[in-house]
Amino acid sequence: MIEGATSLRDKLKPKMEHLIPARTGFAFTVDAGDYIEVVDVEGRQTADFWAFHENDLNEYLSAPHTRIGLMHMFPGPGEAFFSNHRRPIIRVVEDPVPVHDFLSAACDPWRYEELGHKGWHASCQENLELAMKRAGHGWVTTPQPFNIWTNFHLNPDGTFEIRAPETKAGDYILLRAEMPAIIAISACPQDITLTAGGNPTDVQVRVLR
């Protein structure tokens, strides 16, 4: 979006607003046509994002189905993420900082063991499971998330390196639900690598209409 231009989000009215504390997750329901705004509160933070069909948790936002549907890495403004049933589920509306990851699994207990951590550590997988349980949906599988603002830089030789996010305080992404959906977001707790800038912080989410 051109600097100084009016954002669609400024014309929308909030239905829900929630601050997701660092290292935790939150799940909520949206209707088709609702807008979802995710905000990096302090900057250099990442957010794992999942979407499930409200009436069938076995249909969810799918990375491989989206990539083949678009024939490129992840959607830009106006393009949709597809579900594993090959239907549009979430559409990108505004994306001022389009540096994301759509290749990597959510962090999980085994990832922290791999990195040498001893004992329990918060993880995006556990945040998803707990958030869905608190929202009354029970256990779900953990699909590949859309890793908002995760800066895994891909090199020409096919290797990649973990870099800190490029976001500043207040940066956002605006999405739109294409079907009734349950959204889950984790304020990534990764503090061993630079995935969340080495210091996980809060993420804010708003549902707008």
Image (cartoon, rainbow, N blue to C red):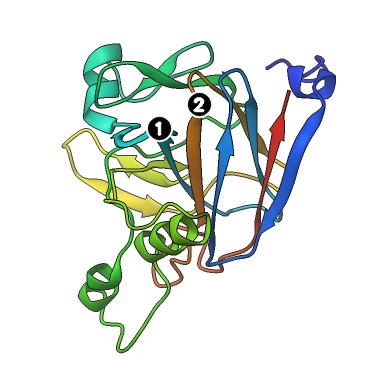
Q: Is residue 56 above or below residue 147?
A: above
Among numbered discs 1 and 2, the one appearing first in the sequence = 1
Q: Residue at x 26, y 46 (%)?
A: 160
Q: Position of residue 15 (x, y in %)?
A: 76, 34
Nearest the camera: 43 or 18?
A: 18
Q: Residue at x 48, y 66 (%)?
A: 189
Looking at the rendered image, the quarter that the C terminus falls into is: top right
Residue beneath disc 2: 180
* Drawn side of residue 83 relative to residue 203, left or right: left
Q: Residue at x 80, y 22 (%)?
A: 12
Q: Which of the 4 quarters of the picture holds residue 13?
A: top right
Count up the numbered dots: 2
Looking at the rendered image, the quarter that the N terminus falls into is: top right
Check if mark 1's residue and mark 2's residue have beta carbons within 8 Å.
yes
Instruction: Point out the frontmost of discs 1 and 2.
Output: 1
Q: Secondary structure at mark 1?
A: loop
Mark linked to residue 131: none
Residue beneath disc 1: 55
Nearest the camera: 85 or 204?
A: 85
Q: Secondary structure at mark 2?
A: loop
Q: Amino acid at mark 1?
A: Asn
